[in-house]
């Protein structure tokens, strides 16, 4: 579904992503894990085309998207929920979702009902300003807005960060629904090990810009966790 080959990225002189090779398989949740500052968010921005790469290739389906602008990636069915959510706080929930619909590649005009089924709170809060929602509700709104694109591939950058446990669980249920029921491919950046274990199928561990380990989630060993994830 998504394949990254020998990818290198720099911020000025600083070599941030080093020779990354990564595959996200269709209908599976691939977790990118690693401590703060190792390059996880940078990797998501590179996939979205928000940062340029120095070398390497990003292939989505059968299409080389390495040089496509960000807007073209949304129309190729990649949805993105950035770290820290970035919803429009002065717009209502409804308006935030309508902005998502504007990017819909199937040209639908209305928010699909499934989105309110997945996030019932957004129906209740429809006319409230985004900024009036709790952190967890904002995260749900950000995910819902990305789903308005009807993506085949969804990137979630630390969706559970700073969010109350019951909402984290709902977000986990949505990830399971998308991958298992809808065969949507998810790339989940996650630092919380239990959440990653519960919802991830495959893992990649980043350490100072390089892939230090990868495999199926069930094979993520205590040794790897101790070496690369515990603080
Ligand atoms: N816009 C930027 N310019 C320069 N350096 C950056 C920028 N954004 C992030 N970095 C640096 O790149 C490294 C990786 O950051 P990031 O991808 O945000 O890590 P993570 O998401 O794993 O915490 C860090 O050392 C960070 O300080
Ligand atoms: Mg980050």
Image (spheres, grey):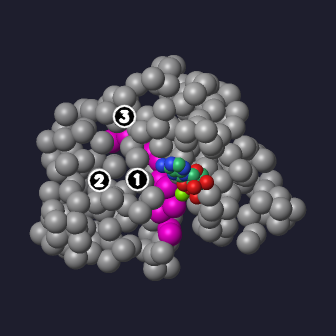
Find residue 76 and report its image quarter.
Answer: top left
Identify residue for label 1. Answer: 81
Pointer 3: residues within 10 angstroms few (<14), some, or many (20+)?
A: some
Location of residue 223 in the rendering, given as x and y in whole percent from the top left corner: 87, 62
Q: CA distance from mark 1 to mark 3?
A: 13 Å
**Residue occupying the point 62% across, 68% down:** 192
Q: Which mark is residue 145?
A: 2
In the structure shown, which secondary structural element does the residue marked by tag 3 occupy?
helix
> Start and end of the magenta stretch?
150-161
Q: Is residue 199 magenta?
A: no
| Mark with earlier residue (1, 2) | 1
Camera-near label (3 vs 2) is 3
The residue at 23%/71% (across/down) is 131
Please indicate, yes or no, whether residue 188 appears anywhere in the rendered image: no
For the point 21% across and 54% down, the residue is 97
Task: Answer with the quarter of the image where residue 25 lies.
Answer: top right
Counting every numbered tag in the picture gives: 3
- Place residue 126 in its image quadrant: bottom left
Disc nearer the start of the sequence (1/3) = 3
- Where residue 70 is drawn, which disc sits there? 3
**Contact, mark 3 vs mark 2 (Cβ under 8 Å):** no
Q: Is residue 71 visible?
A: yes
Q: Earlier in the sequence, mark 3 or mark 2?
A: 3
**Image spot of residue 33 (x, y percent):** 65, 56
Q: Is residue 227 above or below residue 125?
A: above
């Amino acid at each position: 579904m998504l394949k990254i080959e020998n990818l290198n990225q720099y911020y000025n002189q600083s070599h941030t992503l080093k020779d990354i090779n990564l595959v996200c398989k269709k209908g599976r949740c691939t977790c990118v894990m690693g401590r703060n500052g190792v390059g996880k968010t940078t990797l998501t921005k590179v996939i979205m085309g928000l940062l340029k790469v120095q070398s390497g290739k990003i292939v989505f389906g059968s299409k080389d998207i390495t040089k496509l602008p960000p807007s073209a990636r949304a129309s190729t069915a990649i949805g993105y929920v950035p770290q820290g959510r970035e919803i429009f706080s002065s717009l209502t929930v409804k308006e935030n979702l309508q902005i998502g619909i504007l990017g819909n590649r199937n040209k639908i005009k209305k928010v699909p009902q499934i989105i309110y089924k997945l996030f019932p709170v957004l129906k209740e809060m429809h006319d409230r300003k985004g900024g009036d929602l709790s952190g967890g509700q904002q995260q749900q709104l950000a995910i819902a807005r990305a789903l308005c694109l009807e993506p085949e591939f969804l990137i979630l950058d630390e969706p559970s960060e700073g969010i109350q446990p019951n909402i984290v669980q709902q977000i986990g249920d949505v990830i399971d629904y998308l991958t298992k029921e809808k065969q949507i491919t998810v790339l989940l950046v996650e630092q919380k090990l239990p959440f990653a274990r519960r919802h991830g199928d495959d893992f990649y561990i980043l350490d100072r810009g390089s892939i230090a380990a990868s495999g199926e989630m069930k094979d993520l060993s205590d040794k790897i966790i101790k070496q690369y994830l515990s603080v």
